[in-house]
């Protein structure tokens, strides 16, 4: 074996530290080393390693959590409405209990109900955040899974949920929230308060004989009755204007709307007044894509 060793000359330092190994063996050693390393733990790697059963379990718990959130805010909406109804009833009972009780308690209560209206509109915007996610999950994940029709696979709903979790936002504007709650409950409360106030002026202490006496009874302190009546008319006009000028705003995802009313671009049919006030805030309406998806399914079936 010693005879087989041949030295061609003195060895340098580079030759001493260099190992002459075949390329195939080096590739094999590199593969063994790579497999022996522990994979890096990252959110992307964890998501890629999820099995279908694990994904479904996580999505079920997420759906239950969003349902709980939307139910909590829906209950808060009912609480604000109860406040408005109770205060209106108490004010009317006080005003009509005696002829000597002041009539201006009813207009003051109208302003108090207006405060409740804006409080409920704010709560309604928060409710729509959670209801929007629930609606996207139902239309993008649960509906295709339960439907007997062949629905093409859709990956947009998962992207919508992911973006909304990273950057939560309001899905409807302030004016739409105010208009919806006003038309649903508060408009009737304001109408009742206005009619009751007029009845109070006419009846107490005795029925008014003419229009002049009716106007004089509306006086509050040093403020003439005609001024009080004009302020009341302006207030009621503003209430009706907001209620009916926002009727075309239909960005909410939780309301039960007819299928033909679903619009991909809600600004297309919006009044100029409401559009000008909403252009200052660029809200992203991801729930519209879920509605568009359901609308296309019904059209294809027809």
Image (cartoon, rainbow, N blue to C red):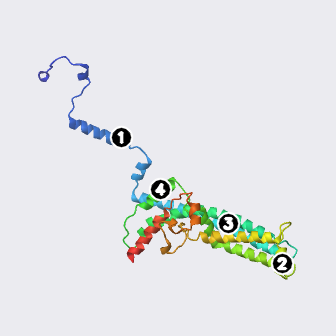
3D distance between C-alphas at marks 4 and 3: 32 Å
Q: Are marks 4 and 1 in contact (CB under 8 Å)?
A: no
Residue at image coords 70%, 64%: 115
Above or below 294: residue 166 = above
Left or right: residue 126 compared with residue 10: right
**Residue in the image at 44% along x and 59% along y:** 158
Q: Please give the residue where the numbered disc 3 appears in the rendered image.
A: 117
Q: Residues within 10 Å of mark 3 (few under 14, many from 20)?
A: many
Instruction: Report the Cα–Cα distance between label 2 and label 1.
Output: 95 Å
CA distance for labels 4 and 1: 31 Å
The mark lying in front, picked from 3 and 2, is: 2
CA gap between label 3 and label 2 equals: 34 Å
Residue 212, which numbered label?
2
Quarter of the image containing the N terminus?
A: top left
Q: For residue 94, what is the image quadrant?
A: bottom right
Residue in the image at 80% along x and 75% along y = 93
Where residue 66 appears, as percent x and y from the top left, is 54, 61
Of callouts 4 and 2, which one flags the residue occurring earlier in the amino acid sequence? Answer: 4
Q: Earlier in the sequence, mark 4 or mark 3?
A: 3
Give the crowd class for mark 4: few <14, some 14-19, many >=20 residues within 10 Å. few
Q: Nearer the viewer, residue 228 or 286?
A: 228
| Picture disc at residue 37 | 1
Q: Secondary structure at mark 4?
A: helix
* Viewer-nearest of discs 4 and 1: 4
Q: Which residue is mark 4?
A: 162
Label 1 secondary element: loop
Q: Secondary structure at mark 2?
A: helix
């Amino acid at each position: 074996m010693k005879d087989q060793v041949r030295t061609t000359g003195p060895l340098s330092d580079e030759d001493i530290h260099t190992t002459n190994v075949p390329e195939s063996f080096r590739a094999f050693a590199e593969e063994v080393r790579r497999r022996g390393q522990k994979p890096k733990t990252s959110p992307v790697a964890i998501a890629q390693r999820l099995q279908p059963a694990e994904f479904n379990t996580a999505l079920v718990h997420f759906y239950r959590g969003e349902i709980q959130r939307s139910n909590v805010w829906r209950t808060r909406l009912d609480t604000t409405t109860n406040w408005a109804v109770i205060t209106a009833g108490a004010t009317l009972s006080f005003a009509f209990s005696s002829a000597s009780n002041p009539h201006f308690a009813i207009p003051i209560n109208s302003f108090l109900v207006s405060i409740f209206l804006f409080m409920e509109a704010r709560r309604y915007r928060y409710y729509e955040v959670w209801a929007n996610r629930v609606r996207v999950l139902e239309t993008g994940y649960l509906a295709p899974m339960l439907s007997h029709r062949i629905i093409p696979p859709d990956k947009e709903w998962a992207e919508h949920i992911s973006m909304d979790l990273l950057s939560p936002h309001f899905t409807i504007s302030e004016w739409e929230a105010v208009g919806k709650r006003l038309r649903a409950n508060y408009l009737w409360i304001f109408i009742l308060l206005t009619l009751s106030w007029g009845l109070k002026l006419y009846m107490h202490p005795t029925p008014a004989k003419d229009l002049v006496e009716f106007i004089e009874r509306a006086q509050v302190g040093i403020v003439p009755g005609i001024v009080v009546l004009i302020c009341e008319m302006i207030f009621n006009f503003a209430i009706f204007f907001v209620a009916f000028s926002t009727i075309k705003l239909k960005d909410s995802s939780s309301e039960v709307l007819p299928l033909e009313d679903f619009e991909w671009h809600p600004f297309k049919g919006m009044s100029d007044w409401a559009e000008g006030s909403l252009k200052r805030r660029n809200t992203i309406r991801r729930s519209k894509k879920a509605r568009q998806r359901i609308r296309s399914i019904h059209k294809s079936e027809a």
